[in-house]
Amino acid sequence: MELIISSPMHKKKHDIAWVELCSSVGNIVIQSNHAPMVMRLEKKSQVVFGLTSGKQESLNVEFGVAHITRESVLLLIVDK
């Protein structure tokens, strides 16, 4: 699964096994073949993701939107 993180200052791509996103209704873990959706990320939240290598990384987000497909997650964010 591919994670694309796009902000006004940079764009990064990662091969991931999963990503955890914070929404107004709670945390949601997205894995490959997840139902497609668009969601607003909770303000001043943290995005946590597991790389295919097994390493876990995180990113602090001021606000943003996630576009989720069966094989990718695109985050349009303003980060700290």
Image (cartoon, rainbow, N blue to C red):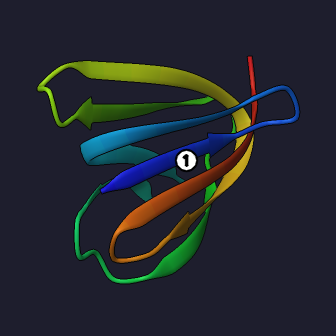
Depth order, front residue of 66/9: 9
Q: Nearer the viewer, residue 33 or 46?
A: 33
Say if residue 27 shows up in the picture: no
Q: Residue furthest right?
A: 8
Q: Tell me how many marks there are.
A: 1
List x then y, in percent, for residue 77.
Answer: 73, 41
Q: Residue at x 34, y 77 (%)?
A: 70
Location of mark 1 (residue): 4
Closer-to-camera residue (66/11): 11
Q: Quadrant of residue 78?
A: top right
Q: Relative to 18, is 37 on the left or the right?
A: right
Taking the spot 76% from the left edge, 28% from the top edge, the residue there is 10
Classify the position of the C terminus by image quarter.
Answer: top right
Q: Position of residue 46 (x, y in %)?
A: 50, 28
Where residue 48 appears, x then y in whole percent?
37, 31
In the picture, the quarter occupied by the N terminus is bottom left
Q: Amino acid at mark 1?
A: Ile
Residue at image coords 61%, 50%: 75
